[in-house]
Amino acid sequence: MAKGKGPSRGGGSKIGRDAGSGQFVPVKEAERRSRTSIVEPLKQPKPKGRDLDSVAQAWEALRDSSGIGPIRNEADYDDRVALLNALIDVVRDDEAHPLAGLMEIVGDLIENYENTHYPMPEAEPREALRFLMEEHGLKQGELPEIGSQGIMSEILAGKRAINARQAKLLAARFGVSAGVFI
């Protein structure tokens, strides 16, 4: 049996605990070892304190009001990017904001979709920034989230690194992972 396979994941034989040795073994193996060996089936864990009917209702309400959900196509992608931009406008850099967690989740959904559908070649952060600026037709002075035009010149020349705050803001601006700029 493959490691990590069990009754809840399918694809493997059922496992239990061999009463003689205490080891986890396939039920058939335990039966072969000894007719006196007792195998206790593993119990499936249940979600603690979760009423899944209530979760389903809350999920449906959240999905309907926010548009959040898996990204399966370009239309979903465009919708999630618009949602992320709206969340960024409201949350900004306030990590205690009630919508900060939602902003992070939407960002992760977008990042996962982009990594699968638009993998970026490995590049220096400044080269990635230069590429994105060219793609969006931006000049150095048109990125106030980075700082002055002098700071932009230093970054693009390789004399200054993009810091974490700038990377986060650039990621939001261009709809890419902050890791592109770090």
Image: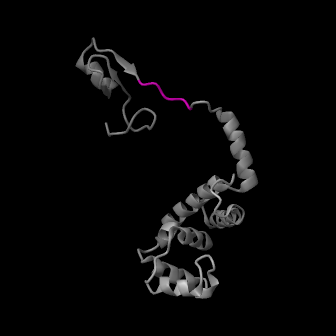
7 to 142, vertically: above or below: above
Given residues 135 and 44, the one toward you in this image is 135
What's the magenta bit mostly, secondary-structure-wise? Answer: loop
Judged left or right of residue 153, residue 20 is left
Residue extending farthest to the left is 33
- Whole-percent x, y for residue 162 in the image: 49, 75
Q: Quadrant of residue 84?
A: bottom right
Judged left or right of residue 161, residue 93 is right
Magenta span contains residue 44:
yes
In which quadrant will I find the N terminus? top left
Q: Is residue 119 visible?
A: no
Residue at point 37% right, 36% down? 12
178 to 161, vertically: above or below: above
42 to 90, vertically: above or below: above
Q: Quadrant of residue 51?
A: top right
Given residues 113 and 27, the one toward you in this image is 113
Q: What residue range appears in magenta? A: 42-47
Residue at point 64% right, 84% down? 142
Residue at point 36% right, 32% down? 13
